[in-house]
Image (cartoon, rainbow, N blue to C red):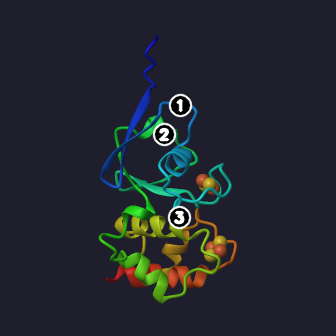
Amino acid sequence: MTSHHEQTTSLTVNGRPCQVPADPRMTLVDALREQLGLTGTKKGCDRGECGACTILLDGRRVLSCMMLAVAASNAEITTIEGLSAEGELHPVQKAFHANDAFQCGFCTPGQVMSAVACIAEGHAGSAAEIKEWMSGNICRCAAYPQIVAAVTEASVQ
Ligand code: FES
Ligand code: FES
């Protein structure tokens, strides 16, 4: 009998260590969604054009469809599931809710992750600045005015 050790890649997601198969072609979005069941991160275009898959890597926003899972192994990954602590919504999530900043909701996790980083980067000083720095996050429902309002509200909290 031969013993077979499946190779794995270690990831740190929302503060927890986890293992995914060490498939050198697996993108981070697929590792999160298909291997770890974290389906809050959405896969829209799968080619870096919509922002639906935005996550934070060491606090910086990254398109998880454009990154290989193995390349994220030494970083702290934060997904939408990791934003709300003990059932309490993150202030950005609260602001999206309060401002009706979504319709179908598909783009929302990516918008929220991007907004968290946008505010942390200091790029939420005006509506124009928010629009510019959130421009990688497409909303097919065109909820942009409400999204800008939500980011503005969250940025002054
Ligand atoms: Fe990654 Fe669209 S799914 S940018
Ligand atoms: Fe539908 Fe943005 S709320 S795509």
Is residue 125 in view from this perspective?
Answer: no
Q: Hey, what amino acid is under mark 1?
A: Asp
Q: Residue 20's spot in the image, x, y percent?
A: 45, 38
Spatial CA span between label 2 and label 3:
18 Å
Q: Determine the CA span between mark 3 and mark 1.
A: 25 Å
Residue to which mark 1 is pinned: 23
Beta carbon at label 3 within 8 Å of ligand 1:
yes
Dot placed on the residue nearer the N-terminal end, 3 or 1:
1
- Residue 61 position, x and y percent, is 45, 56
Identified at 64% across, 60% down, the residue is 50
Per the image, the residue denoted by label 2 is 69
Q: Indicate the quadrant of ligand 1 in the picture.
A: bottom right
**Image check: 137 left or right of 125?**
right
| Quarter assignment of residue 144 | bottom right
Q: Residues within 10 Å of mark 1 (few under 14, many from 20)?
A: some
Disc 2 on helix, strand or loop? Answer: helix
State which quadrant residue 154 falls in. Answer: bottom left
Q: Give the total of numbered labels.
A: 3
Mark number, residue 110:
3
Q: Residue at x 68, y 77 (%)?
A: 141
Circle nearer the viewer, 2 or 1: 1
Q: Residue at x 55, y 41 (%)?
A: 27
Amino acid under label 3?
A: Gly
**Residue 80 at what x, y percent from top left?**
44, 64
